[in-house]
Image: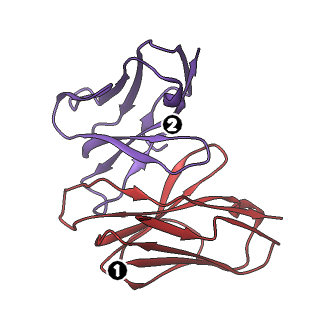
Chain colours: A red, B purple
Amino acid sequence: DTAVSQTPKYLVTQMGNDKSIKCEQNLGHDTMYWYKQDSKKFLKIMFSYNNKELIINETVPNRFSPKSPDKAHLNLHINSLELGDSAVYFCASSQGSGLDSYNEQFFGPGTRLTVL
Amino acid sequence: GQNIDQPTEMTATEGAIVQINCTYQTSGFNGLFWYQQHAGEAPTFLSYNVLDGLEEKGRFSSFLSRSKGYSYLLLKELQMKDSASYLCGGGRTTDSWGKLQFGAGTQVVVTP
């Protein structure tokens, strides 16, 4: 059984287009995340939702808009794609919501986005 | 990564031991994670140290010194499948819950 799944796995598109990436987790976790990993392999947090509520919103262009219809799903919509958006986007999830506590994050397989 | 430093690459032979060091600014850090990431795949959890000392899990051990802002991941009896990037990361008490900052990763190359 896939724990954290993302679709699509590969996404190739033209500059200026709008695209969405979907993520689902079947682990019953309360918290989900979006990360961006660029060509230099830095893994950077973008957003996090806890029980459908936005709790982490890093400094990313407002062309990126996350949406969590329920706690098992977290989608990422990107408007007006730019060349610099090319990267691998990872979804992740973790259990719990306590302050000052950290739990293992389970990552999805990633979506490799290429903007031409 | 922000405030987290680790070497870019390390090479070792099969059966050997490799130690990957990670240093970070101590202010507010709340424990340290290590993740393994094979090329083209997702990061997978290896360890989480919140208290000082060494934690051993089979061939992998992780150490933390909070006062020194220092951690290391020790890989013993290296196998070819250990060739991967190893990410050091942690969270700050001043940040939102669950937010992790990662280093750039250390690429470990295991040679026959």
Does residue B7 appear left or right of residue A55 in this picture?
A: right
Residue on which the image places disc 2? B105
Does residue A100 appear left or right of residue A28 in this picture?
A: left
- Which residue type carries mark 1? Lys
- Residue B98 location (% of width, % of height): 31, 60
Q: Secondary structure at mark 1?
A: loop
Closer to the camera: disc 2 or disc 1?
1
Q: Are labels 2 and 1 assigned to the same chain?
A: no
- Which residue type carries mark 2? Gly
* Position of A76 relative to B65 (above/below): below
Residue on which the image places disc 1? A71
Depth check: give the residue in front, B32 or B46: B46
- In the picture as drawn, the residue positioned furthest to the front comes out as A1
- In the picture as drawn, the residue positioned furthest to the bottom comes out as A69
State how far apart marks 2 and 1 are (Cα).
30 Å
Please rate how many residues cluster around mark 2, counting C-alpha atoms within 10 Å: few if below 14, some from 14 to 19, many from 20: many
Give the residue at x 27% y 62%: B97
